[in-house]
């Protein structure tokens, strides 16, 4: 195989070895280092070290005769064209760098062992490809990416980065907790007016279930969940939840661990309560929705988002529950 790749803005700033790991997907890491040492990969016609940082416009020459099964740029385009996907996206906000999508409950963000087609990722990629904002013939290793995740049965706002620079900046903002993520939920029991829940979470990967405890143990990861009770009728409460840390199933497991499971949650919830809400209101998913995203002070290319907030639209069945149970209206 002999190929020449011109580095785009979305490929720049990566180490050469990390770029090759993404591009040569069927080659082991040890073999990648071997072909770099043997000068079978050159940058701008010269031997380069594995830690070389790519620059936009660099020419990467790969000469490997014994490696096959690498998709060409043309084949990448053909794969996208063959995707049978629903692109009826609910777009909350869009600019040249980011895309905010209101994800439906029941939609997978990423593919997994049981669900590989029509994920939110594939829908967004298809949408950006058709609009001309993503060209897989040029972007060899970069794809538009989600920077936050939601369970399949949790709806609400997902943030997508359209380019590599925005992806890096958004990931940094999340790490520094400068993106505020709030949820609306209906839970069992009466909650205090406001509070902060802390603990340690462990996950059983085999059974896909998380547990909260007061002790860290060997594998526990610290979690923090803030909440504010918007209204309660004594039996159920409507709460706004702010996610401080972002662990898998954190909100659901945390609320369940203190005796306030989310209504409709089949894994961590109360079966009798869930059955009542299913019969009375037709609720089939957990009443948890990622309702708002707020950006703090930002420097750099995304500074124009500083202080801005964006809101999702709760499903009509959720709004009906909130109105009938609490006589309360959520601003949309």
Image: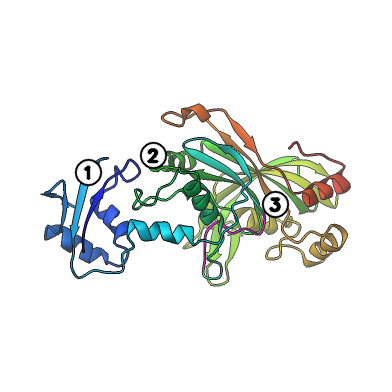
What element does badge 2 sit on?
helix
Q: Alpha-carbon distance for marks 1 and 2?
A: 17 Å
For the stretch drawn in magenta, the main secondary structure is loop
Q: Which mark, residue 165? A: 2
What element does badge 1 sit on?
loop
* Count of numbered circles on the image: 3
Q: Nearer the viewer, mark 1 or mark 2?
A: 1
Instruction: Using residue 266 as the reference point, say whether residue 302 is left or right of it.
Output: left
Q: Earlier in the sequence, mark 2 or mark 3?
A: 2
Which quadrant holds residue 274?
bottom right
* Whole-percent x, y for residue 145 in the image: 47, 49
Q: Residues within 10 Å of mark 1 (few under 14, many from 20)?
A: some
* Whole-percent x, y for residue 60 in the image: 21, 50
| Magenta stretch: includes residue 150 | no
Front residue of this view, candidates 260 and 269:
269
Residue sitting farthest toward the bottom: 206
Instruction: Determine which residue is flagged by label 3.
Output: 288
* Whole-percent x, y for residue 226 in the image: 64, 43
Instruction: Determine which residue is flagged by label 1.
Output: 58
Q: Residues within 10 Å of mark 2 (few under 14, many from 20)?
A: some
Taking the spot 50% from the left edge, 48% from the top edge, the residue there is: 130
What element does badge 3 sit on?
strand
Q: Nearer the viewer, mark 2 or mark 3?
A: 2
Taking the spot 21% from the left edge, 64% from the top edge, the residue there is: 1
Q: Earlier in the sequence, mark 1 or mark 3?
A: 1
Taking the spot 82% from the left edge, 62% from the top edge, the residue there is: 278
**Magenta highlight range:** 105-112
């Amino acid at each position: 195989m002999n190929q020449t790749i011109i580095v785009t803005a979305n490929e720049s700033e990566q180490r050469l070895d990390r770029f090759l790991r993404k591009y040569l997907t069927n080659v082991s890491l040890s073999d990648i280092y071997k072909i770099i040492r043997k000068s079978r990969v050159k940058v701008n016609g010269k031997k380069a070290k594995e830690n070389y940082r790519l620059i936009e416009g660099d020419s990467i020459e790969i000469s490997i005769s014994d490696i096959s099964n690498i998709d060409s740029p043309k084949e990448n385009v053909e794969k996208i064209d063959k995707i049978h996907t629903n692109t009826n996206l609910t777009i909350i906000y869009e600019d040249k760098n980011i895309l905010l999508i209101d994800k439906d409950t029941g939609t997978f963000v990423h593919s997994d062992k049981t669900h590989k087609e029509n994920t939110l990722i594939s829908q967004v990629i298809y949408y950006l490809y058709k609009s001309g904002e993503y060209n897989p013939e040029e972007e060899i290793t970069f794809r538009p990416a989600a920077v936050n995740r939601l369970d399949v049965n949790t709806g609400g706002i997902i943030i997508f980065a359209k380019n590599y620079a925005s992806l890096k900046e958004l990931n940094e903002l999340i790490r520094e907790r400068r993106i505020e993520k709030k949820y609306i939920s209906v839970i069992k029991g009466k909650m205090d007016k406001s509070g902060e829940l802390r603990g340690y979470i462990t996950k059983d990967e085999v059974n896909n279930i998380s547990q909260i405890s007061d002790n860290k143990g060997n594998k526990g990861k610290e979690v923090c969940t803030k909440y504010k009770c918007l209204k309660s009728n004594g039996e159920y409460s409507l709460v706004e939840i702010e996610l401080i840390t972002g662990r898998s199933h954190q909100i659901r497991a945390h609320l369940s661990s203190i005796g306030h499971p989310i209504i409709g949650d089949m894994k961590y919830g109360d079966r009798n309560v869930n059955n009542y809400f299913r019969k009375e209101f037709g609720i089939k998913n957990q009443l948890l929705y990622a309702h708002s995203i707020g950006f703090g002070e930002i420097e750099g290319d995304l500074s124009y988002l500083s202080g801005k907030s964006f809101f999702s639209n709760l499903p009509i069945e959720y709004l009906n529950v909130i109105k009938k149970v609490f006589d309360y209206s959520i601003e949309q």
